[in-house]
Image (cartoon, grey):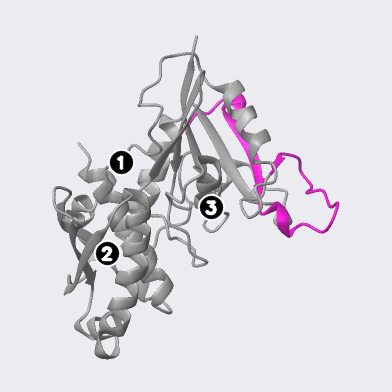
Amino acid sequence: MTRCGIVALVGAPNVGKSSLLNAMVGEPLAIVSPKPQTTREPVRGLVSDTATQIIFTDTAGLLDPAYPLQRAMLHAALLALSDADLVLYLHPAPDAPAPPLDALLRSLGVAPPALPEAKILPVLTKGDLLPPRGAAPGGGAVVSAQDGAGVPALLAAIRARLPEGPFLYDPDEIGTQPLRFFAAEFVREAAFAQLEQELPYSLAVEIEEFRESTSPVYIRATLAVERESQKPIVLGKGGRTIKAIGTQARERIEALLGGRVHLDLWVAVWPKWRKSPAVLARLGLPLPSERA
Protein backbone atom coordinates (compact mmCIF):
# COMPACT_ATOMS: atom_id res chain seq x y z
CA MET A 1 0.00 0.00 0.00
CA THR A 2 1.32 3.43 -0.93
CA ARG A 3 1.14 6.55 1.22
CA CYS A 4 0.30 10.04 0.00
CA GLY A 5 -0.47 13.25 1.82
CA ILE A 6 -0.44 17.05 1.82
CA VAL A 7 2.14 18.66 4.10
CA ALA A 8 1.86 22.39 4.81
CA LEU A 9 4.87 24.47 5.85
CA VAL A 10 3.67 27.25 8.16
CA GLY A 11 5.25 29.78 10.48
CA ALA A 12 5.99 33.45 10.95
CA PRO A 13 7.63 35.42 8.11
CA ASN A 14 11.27 34.71 7.27
CA VAL A 15 11.59 31.43 9.19
CA GLY A 16 12.95 29.60 6.14
CA LYS A 17 9.86 27.86 4.74
CA SER A 18 10.77 28.36 1.09
CA SER A 19 14.41 27.40 1.61
CA LEU A 20 13.36 24.22 3.38
CA LEU A 21 10.86 23.34 0.64
CA ASN A 22 13.60 23.69 -1.96
CA ALA A 23 15.97 21.56 0.11
CA MET A 24 13.40 18.77 0.50
CA VAL A 25 12.28 18.82 -3.15
CA GLY A 26 15.85 19.09 -4.37
CA GLU A 27 15.00 21.90 -6.81
CA PRO A 28 14.70 25.69 -6.30
CA LEU A 29 10.95 25.80 -6.87
CA ALA A 30 10.02 28.41 -4.28
CA ILE A 31 11.53 31.86 -4.60
CA VAL A 32 13.89 32.91 -1.81
CA SER A 33 14.92 36.34 -0.61
CA PRO A 34 16.44 37.77 2.58
CA LYS A 35 13.43 40.10 2.62
CA PRO A 36 10.47 38.72 4.59
CA GLN A 37 7.04 38.07 3.03
CA THR A 38 8.50 36.95 -0.29
CA THR A 39 6.01 34.09 -0.67
CA ARG A 40 2.49 35.21 -1.61
CA GLU A 41 0.52 32.44 -3.28
CA PRO A 42 1.26 28.96 -1.86
CA VAL A 43 3.87 26.98 -3.81
CA ARG A 44 3.42 23.22 -4.10
CA GLY A 45 6.31 20.81 -4.54
CA LEU A 46 6.40 17.03 -4.80
CA VAL A 47 8.73 14.43 -3.33
CA SER A 48 7.98 10.86 -4.44
CA ASP A 49 9.63 7.48 -4.02
CA THR A 50 8.34 3.99 -4.75
CA ALA A 51 6.04 3.92 -1.72
CA THR A 52 5.27 7.51 -0.75
CA GLN A 53 4.33 10.84 -2.28
CA ILE A 54 4.61 14.06 -0.27
CA ILE A 55 2.74 17.10 -1.56
CA PHE A 56 4.39 20.07 0.11
CA THR A 57 2.65 23.45 0.33
CA ASP A 58 4.86 26.44 1.09
CA THR A 59 2.72 29.22 2.55
CA ALA A 60 3.08 32.93 3.18
CA GLY A 61 4.37 33.90 6.60
CA LEU A 62 1.70 34.22 9.28
CA LEU A 63 1.41 37.90 10.16
CA ASP A 64 -1.17 40.47 11.21
CA PRO A 65 -2.33 41.80 7.80
CA ALA A 66 -2.07 45.54 7.20
CA TYR A 67 -3.79 45.72 3.79
CA PRO A 68 -5.88 43.48 1.47
CA LEU A 69 -2.93 41.72 -0.22
CA GLN A 70 -1.67 40.55 3.16
CA ARG A 71 -5.20 39.52 4.14
CA ALA A 72 -5.40 37.40 0.99
CA MET A 73 -1.98 35.88 1.74
CA LEU A 74 -3.02 34.99 5.28
CA HIS A 75 -6.29 33.54 4.01
CA ALA A 76 -4.44 31.32 1.52
CA ALA A 77 -2.04 30.16 4.25
CA LEU A 78 -4.90 29.26 6.59
CA LEU A 79 -6.65 27.30 3.83
CA ALA A 80 -3.45 25.34 3.20
CA LEU A 81 -3.11 24.67 6.93
CA SER A 82 -6.67 23.39 7.19
CA ASP A 83 -6.37 21.19 4.10
CA ALA A 84 -3.10 19.52 5.16
CA ASP A 85 -2.69 15.97 6.41
CA LEU A 86 0.40 17.11 8.31
CA VAL A 87 1.58 20.58 9.34
CA LEU A 88 5.27 21.44 9.67
CA TYR A 89 5.36 24.33 12.14
CA LEU A 90 8.64 26.11 11.46
CA HIS A 91 10.58 28.33 13.84
CA PRO A 92 14.24 29.45 13.78
CA ALA A 93 16.39 27.26 16.03
CA PRO A 94 18.37 30.20 17.47
CA ASP A 95 15.07 31.73 18.69
CA ALA A 96 13.60 28.54 20.13
CA PRO A 97 11.36 27.62 21.79
CA ALA A 98 8.53 28.54 19.48
CA PRO A 99 5.19 29.76 20.79
CA PRO A 100 2.38 27.23 20.32
CA LEU A 101 0.89 27.45 16.83
CA ASP A 102 -2.60 28.18 18.16
CA ALA A 103 -1.18 31.02 20.28
CA LEU A 104 0.52 32.51 17.21
CA LEU A 105 -2.74 32.36 15.27
CA ARG A 106 -4.73 33.92 18.11
CA SER A 107 -2.21 36.79 18.27
CA LEU A 108 -3.19 37.53 14.67
CA GLY A 109 -6.89 37.56 15.50
CA VAL A 110 -7.42 34.17 13.84
CA ALA A 111 -9.47 31.38 15.37
CA PRO A 112 -7.12 28.35 15.23
CA PRO A 113 -8.47 25.37 13.28
CA ALA A 114 -9.09 22.21 15.26
CA LEU A 115 -5.79 20.42 14.65
CA PRO A 116 -4.94 17.30 16.66
CA GLU A 117 -1.50 17.48 18.21
CA ALA A 118 -0.36 14.48 16.16
CA LYS A 119 -1.00 16.50 12.99
CA ILE A 120 1.59 19.17 13.92
CA LEU A 121 5.30 18.44 13.58
CA PRO A 122 7.48 21.20 15.07
CA VAL A 123 10.59 21.93 12.99
CA LEU A 124 13.45 24.19 14.05
CA THR A 125 15.07 25.79 11.00
CA LYS A 126 18.43 27.53 10.46
CA GLY A 127 20.22 24.89 12.52
CA ASP A 128 23.50 25.99 10.95
CA LEU A 129 23.26 29.19 13.00
CA LEU A 130 23.43 27.30 16.30
CA PRO A 131 26.82 27.26 18.05
CA PRO A 132 28.92 24.10 17.51
CA ARG A 133 27.35 21.14 19.26
CA GLY A 134 24.61 23.45 20.41
CA ALA A 135 21.11 22.13 21.00
CA ALA A 136 18.03 24.21 20.39
CA PRO A 137 15.77 24.44 23.46
CA GLY A 138 12.20 23.31 23.29
CA GLY A 139 12.60 20.14 21.24
CA GLY A 140 11.54 19.55 17.67
CA ALA A 141 13.43 18.42 14.59
CA VAL A 142 16.42 20.66 13.83
CA VAL A 143 17.27 21.19 10.17
CA SER A 144 19.38 23.44 8.00
CA ALA A 145 18.36 24.18 4.45
CA GLN A 146 21.77 25.79 4.02
CA ASP A 147 23.80 22.59 4.40
CA GLY A 148 21.04 19.95 4.33
CA ALA A 149 21.60 18.78 7.88
CA GLY A 150 18.56 17.03 9.31
CA VAL A 151 16.61 17.08 6.04
CA PRO A 152 16.77 13.30 5.35
CA ALA A 153 15.63 12.57 8.91
CA LEU A 154 12.79 15.06 8.57
CA LEU A 155 11.65 13.47 5.29
CA ALA A 156 11.66 10.05 6.98
CA ALA A 157 9.55 11.40 9.84
CA ILE A 158 7.09 12.91 7.35
CA ARG A 159 6.78 9.68 5.34
CA ALA A 160 5.98 7.72 8.49
CA ARG A 161 3.07 10.09 9.20
CA LEU A 162 1.46 10.09 5.75
CA PRO A 163 -1.98 8.48 5.38
CA GLU A 164 -2.37 5.41 3.20
CA GLY A 165 -3.64 6.12 -0.29
CA PRO A 166 -2.76 6.30 -4.00
CA PHE A 167 -0.44 8.90 -5.48
CA LEU A 168 -2.24 12.03 -6.67
CA TYR A 169 0.42 13.13 -9.17
CA ASP A 170 2.91 11.66 -11.60
CA PRO A 171 5.88 10.56 -9.45
CA ASP A 172 8.30 12.10 -11.97
CA GLU A 173 6.91 15.60 -11.39
CA ILE A 174 8.41 18.01 -8.85
CA GLY A 175 5.59 20.58 -8.80
CA THR A 176 1.85 20.72 -9.36
CA GLN A 177 1.44 24.26 -10.71
CA PRO A 178 1.70 25.33 -14.36
CA LEU A 179 5.00 26.57 -15.77
CA ARG A 180 3.63 30.08 -16.22
CA PHE A 181 3.13 30.28 -12.43
CA PHE A 182 6.81 29.55 -11.82
CA ALA A 183 7.85 31.94 -14.60
CA ALA A 184 5.98 34.76 -12.84
CA GLU A 185 7.50 33.78 -9.50
CA PHE A 186 11.04 33.77 -10.90
CA VAL A 187 10.55 37.24 -12.39
CA ARG A 188 9.30 38.46 -9.03
CA GLU A 189 12.27 36.82 -7.28
CA ALA A 190 14.66 38.65 -9.60
CA ALA A 191 12.85 41.92 -8.87
CA PHE A 192 13.26 41.33 -5.14
CA ALA A 193 16.98 40.83 -5.70
CA GLN A 194 17.47 43.90 -7.90
CA LEU A 195 15.19 46.44 -6.22
CA GLU A 196 15.79 48.03 -2.85
CA GLN A 197 13.69 49.07 0.12
CA GLU A 198 9.92 48.61 -0.08
CA LEU A 199 9.41 48.68 -3.85
CA PRO A 200 9.29 44.87 -4.31
CA TYR A 201 6.22 44.75 -2.06
CA SER A 202 4.45 47.18 -4.41
CA LEU A 203 5.25 45.04 -7.44
CA ALA A 204 3.18 42.30 -9.05
CA VAL A 205 4.04 40.05 -12.00
CA GLU A 206 1.55 38.73 -14.51
CA ILE A 207 2.36 36.46 -17.46
CA GLU A 208 0.59 37.89 -20.50
CA GLU A 209 1.79 35.32 -23.04
CA PHE A 210 3.52 31.93 -22.75
CA ARG A 211 4.29 30.17 -26.05
CA GLU A 212 5.93 26.78 -25.44
CA SER A 213 5.58 25.81 -29.12
CA THR A 214 8.21 28.34 -30.23
CA SER A 215 11.99 27.98 -30.08
CA PRO A 216 13.09 29.65 -27.94
CA VAL A 217 10.01 29.60 -25.69
CA TYR A 218 8.44 33.06 -25.74
CA ILE A 219 7.25 34.59 -22.47
CA ARG A 220 5.84 38.10 -22.12
CA ALA A 221 5.39 39.37 -18.57
CA THR A 222 4.14 42.59 -17.03
CA LEU A 223 5.77 43.99 -13.92
CA ALA A 224 3.10 46.15 -12.31
CA VAL A 225 3.75 48.91 -9.81
CA GLU A 226 1.32 51.19 -8.01
CA ARG A 227 2.65 54.65 -8.92
CA GLU A 228 4.09 56.32 -12.02
CA SER A 229 7.11 57.40 -9.97
CA GLN A 230 8.00 53.73 -9.45
CA LYS A 231 8.27 52.89 -13.17
CA PRO A 232 11.68 54.52 -13.74
CA ILE A 233 13.04 52.73 -10.66
CA VAL A 234 12.08 49.34 -12.13
CA LEU A 235 13.43 50.31 -15.54
CA GLY A 236 16.67 51.78 -14.22
CA LYS A 237 19.01 54.17 -16.00
CA GLY A 238 19.13 53.17 -19.65
CA GLY A 239 16.98 50.15 -18.85
CA ARG A 240 19.74 48.53 -16.78
CA THR A 241 17.55 47.37 -13.90
CA ILE A 242 14.85 45.76 -16.03
CA LYS A 243 17.60 44.05 -18.07
CA ALA A 244 19.20 42.68 -14.92
CA ILE A 245 15.82 41.41 -13.71
CA GLY A 246 15.23 39.77 -17.09
CA THR A 247 18.66 38.11 -17.19
CA GLN A 248 18.35 36.64 -13.70
CA ALA A 249 14.77 35.46 -14.25
CA ARG A 250 15.50 34.00 -17.68
CA GLU A 251 18.32 31.87 -16.30
CA ARG A 252 16.01 30.45 -13.62
CA ILE A 253 13.22 29.76 -16.11
CA GLU A 254 15.58 28.12 -18.60
CA ALA A 255 16.92 25.84 -15.87
CA LEU A 256 13.37 24.74 -15.03
CA LEU A 257 12.29 24.28 -18.65
CA GLY A 258 15.54 22.75 -19.81
CA GLY A 259 15.71 24.97 -22.90
CA ARG A 260 16.17 28.49 -24.23
CA VAL A 261 13.69 31.25 -23.34
CA HIS A 262 13.00 34.69 -24.80
CA LEU A 263 11.69 36.73 -21.87
CA ASP A 264 9.96 39.98 -22.81
CA LEU A 265 9.37 42.27 -19.80
CA TRP A 266 7.12 45.32 -19.64
CA VAL A 267 6.36 47.74 -16.81
CA ALA A 268 2.85 49.02 -16.13
CA VAL A 269 1.08 51.02 -13.43
CA TRP A 270 -1.85 49.40 -11.62
CA PRO A 271 -2.93 52.04 -9.09
CA LYS A 272 -3.51 50.60 -5.60
CA TRP A 273 -3.49 47.01 -6.94
CA ARG A 274 -2.66 45.63 -3.47
CA LYS A 275 -6.10 46.84 -2.32
CA SER A 276 -8.07 45.66 -5.37
CA PRO A 277 -10.10 42.47 -4.83
CA ALA A 278 -10.39 41.96 -8.60
CA VAL A 279 -6.64 42.20 -9.22
CA LEU A 280 -5.81 40.00 -6.23
CA ALA A 281 -8.23 37.34 -7.45
CA ARG A 282 -6.67 37.50 -10.93
CA LEU A 283 -3.26 36.96 -9.38
CA GLY A 284 -4.49 33.86 -7.55
CA LEU A 285 -5.01 35.48 -4.16
CA PRO A 286 -8.75 36.06 -3.65
CA LEU A 287 -9.86 37.70 -0.44
CA PRO A 288 -12.01 35.52 1.84
CA SER A 289 -15.22 37.21 0.71
CA GLU A 290 -14.23 36.73 -2.95
CA ARG A 291 -13.94 32.95 -2.77
CA ALA A 292 -17.11 31.11 -3.71
Which quarter of the rendering shows the C terminus? top left
Q: From the viewer's perspective, tell me whether residue 163 is left or right of residue 209.
A: right
Magenta-highlighted residues:
113-142
Q: Residue at image x 58%, y 41%?
A: 89
Q: From the viewer's perspective, tell me whether residue 89 is left or right of residue 30.
A: right
Asked if 227 appears above or below 220 in the picture, the reply is: below
Residue wearing tag 2: 204
For the residues marked 2 and 1, what is the alpha-carbon distance in whole angstroms? 18 Å
Residue 131 within the segment the image draws in magenta: yes
Picture coordinates of residue 125, whole percent (x, y): 65, 50
How crowded pointer 3 is (Cα within 10 Å; few <14, some 14-19, many 20+) is rated as many
- Extreme residue toward the right, this view: 133
Picture coordinates of residue 84, whole percent (x, y): 45, 30
Residue wearing tag 3: 19
Asked if 71 appears above or below 203 in the picture, the reply is: above
Residue 12 within the segment the image draws in magenta: no
For mark 1, give the secondary structure. loop
For mark 3, give the secondary structure. helix
For mark 2, give the secondary structure. strand
Q: Nearer the viewer, residue 11 or 153?
A: 153
